[in-house]
Image (spheres, grey):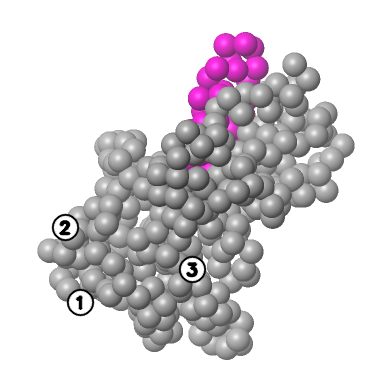
Amino acid sequence: MKVLQFREAVCEAMSEEMRRDESIYLMGEEVAEYNGAYKASKGMLDEFGAKRVIDTPISELGFAGVAIGSAMNGNRPIVEFMTFNFSLVAIDQIINNAAKMRQMSGGQINIPIVFRGPTASAGQLAATHSQAFESWYANCPGLKVIVPSNPADAKGLLKSAIRDDDPVIFMESEQMYGDKGEVPEGEYVIPIGVAEIKRKGTDVTIVSFGKIIKEAYLAAEALAKEGIECEIIDLRTVRPMDHNTILESVKKTNRLVILEEAWPFGNVATEITYQVQSRVFDYLDAPIIKINTADTPAPYSPVLLEEWLPNSNDVIKAVKKVMYK
């Protein structure tokens, strides 16, 4: 094992795949000369040149459309959005062209493309730069949505995403790029659509994904000191969702808490709640609790932002509630 930062794992995944397949290229704002807004493409321009690591204008709709057209013609683009907040400018291309082209062409045209970049809040970036888009894109058939929480998963899942023949939304976080973790040596991929049990437990299941899962780990450590053992599932892929891993865990623990950094209405946690109550209702010993951000745009004030975001104390309270403690 070697230790890499999250940004280094992303860079390594892209570079390894570009060495393997000349049809793969990276494009986006500041990905080349500046080595990436978050240095996730550091050194790639020097290795692959300006024809395969391409700086774009500030025109997400334009370069997303160019990349989709390129994918239709046999290439495998990686498109970096400086933040998925900016992908709203390109959402018509992503939803109406990338996601739907296979069906609209009767299976004749596929779009092997990865859209990647950070999602959700990242400190004092205020309301228009702090939105979580996982559930937005997961709502659309034809898209796969991946949200890794650590460097090893990021590398293995990004390599799988680049090799996939369908459009993939790959979501990161500004606040994770500096995170360090062990990453396997050599070639490896992680299958899309497979969740992982990160911590085994017997009393309650906690499902989460992305950077907010760190709060679940903190809560589990504190609860263990009180004799409550939490099982933590990292969803990793939002769509397709690994329902079976969640269902089997709930059948064992009989309780479920879902932690998600998103607004409360119509999110990933809502879908998980529906699947669990409809398929293993008789195993539940308490109502499911989902923990989300406050139902407002993200505030700029650090004091208000701390109140707006879910944290480990919220998880502890929820676990104790489903445990009737």
Residue tagged by mark 3?
Answer: 88
**Is residue 194 something that shows in the picture?**
no
Q: Quadrant of the N terminus?
A: top left
How far apart are labels 2 and 1 at the CA level? 14 Å
Q: Earlier in the sequence, mark 2 or mark 3?
A: 2
Residue tagged by mark 1?
Answer: 51
Q: Which residues are magenta?
A: 208-235
Asked if 215 appears above or below 270 in the picture, the reply is: above
Residue 230 lies within the magenta run: yes
Disc 2 packing (10 Å; few <14; some 14–19; many ≥20): some
Residue 25: % across, % down: 29, 71
Q: Earlier in the sequence, mark 2 or mark 1?
A: 2
Report the front residue among 288 and 17: 288
Residue type pointed to by label 1? Lys
Q: Quadrant of residue 318?
A: top right
Tag 2 near tag 3, CB within 8 Å = no
Residue 86: % across, % down: 42, 65
